[in-house]
Amino acid sequence: RNRAHRERRSRSRRRDRHGGGRDGDRGRDGDRGRDRGGRDHGEVKVVGGSGDWRRDLKDFIEKNGLDERTREALKQLDKPKVIEVMGIDGGRNTFILENVRNPDAVVMSRIKRVTSS
């Protein structure tokens, strides 16, 4: 039993020394490389989309099969926030929600994030 305990301890020490473990995927400054916000909310920069944000909103709702509650929540937002939620501002959000179990939950989470900032 003592030997097994020592082996586990030495493996964890090796991992700590060689960059494995919990913080091993972080850069020098401790950042994991994801965008953490900090945007300028002045003029809206639209990178994708058709150029008509209202038409893009209809496409976003249709292509992601969003329910009535989510549609109404989107329609309550102002233009810059809708563009950010849809992901056509060049940020981290995507327009088409692929491989997600519940697109409505993803969009509602995005709405909550943009309205709280």
Image: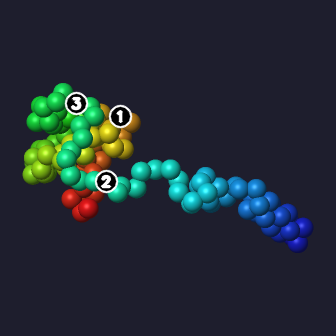
Amino acid on which disc 1 is placed: Glu
Label 2, on which residue? Answer: 39
Label 3, on which residue? Answer: 49
Marks 1/2: CA–CA distance:
25 Å
> Dividing the picture into quarters, in which one does residue 7 lie?
bottom right
> Which quarter of the rendering shows the N terminus?
bottom right
Q: In this rendering, does residue 59 appear at all?
A: no
> Dividing the picture into quarters, in which one does residue 83 lie?
top left
Q: Nearer the viewer, residue 101 or 73?
A: 73
Q: Position of residue 20 (x, y in %)?
A: 70, 55
Amino acid on which disc 2 is placed: Arg
Label 1, on which residue? Answer: 98
Amino acid on which disc 3 is placed: Gly
Few, some or many residues within 10 Å of mark 2 (<14, 14–19, 20+) = few
Q: Secondary structure at mark 1?
A: loop
Nearer to us: label 3 or label 1: 3
Q: Are marks 2 and 3 in contact (CB under 8 Å)?
A: no
Q: Are marks 3 and 1 in contact (CB under 8 Å)?
A: no
Is 62 rendered above or below residue 11?
above
Q: Secondary structure at mark 3?
A: loop
